[in-house]
Image (tube, rainbow, N blue to C red):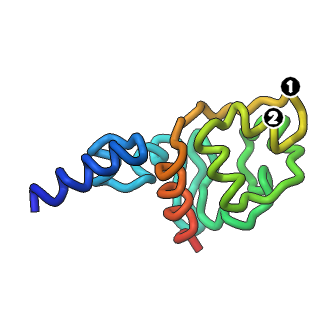
Amino acid sequence: MKKTIITIGALAMLMGGMTIGEAVAGPESKCKACHTFDQGGKHKTGPNLFGIIGRKAGSTDFKKYGKSLKNADWVWDKENLKAWVCDSKKAIKTLTGDDKAKTRMGNQKKCGEAADAVVAFLETLK
């Protein structure tokens, strides 16, 4: 079992830039600091992410959205979420079409397969 966990962690680090802890804990482990994932869960520093796939950005009752997310006109689909978890600072500009748009969320730098893993987890929250 220990060899399996180490192998999974090593592959995750090589392929997606995750740490062994993230690979074993799941892609949501880092997100737990600011987000919750349960239906009806409370917001933390960031909004609850239950049911995010297919939801209009900035549309929950979370009170701390920045201006760019409050005025969002896009839906959180797989591609938008992958771009967001890779580089939220760049994604907010692309998604809004505003080079001056900002987000309060820090860059997570989960790109490629690491972003795929995060989005796959978010897809389970239905």
Crowding around mark 1 (Cα neighbors within 10 Å: few <14, some 14 to 19, many 20+) is few
Question: Among all residues in the image, which is located at the extreme left?
Answer: 2
Q: Residue at the spot x=52%, y=60% of the render?
A: 37
Tag on residue 93? 2
Asked whether disc 2 touches disc 1, contact meaning CB atoms under 8 Å apart, the reply is yes
Image quadrant assignment for residue 3: bottom left
- Say whether disc 2 or disc 1 marks the residue closer to the N-terminus: 2
Per the rendering, the mark at residue 100 is 1
At which x and y percent is residue 21?
A: 28, 45
In the rendered image, which quarter is residue 39 located in?
A: bottom right
Q: Quadrant of the N terminus?
A: bottom left
For badge 1, the amino acid type reads Lys
Give the residue drawn at x 60%, y 55%.
Answer: 48
The image position of residue 54, as x and y in percent, is 73, 67
- Where 91 sits versus 59, above or below? above
Disc 2 versus disc 1: distance between alpha carbons? 7 Å
Image point (57%, 68%), residue name: 123
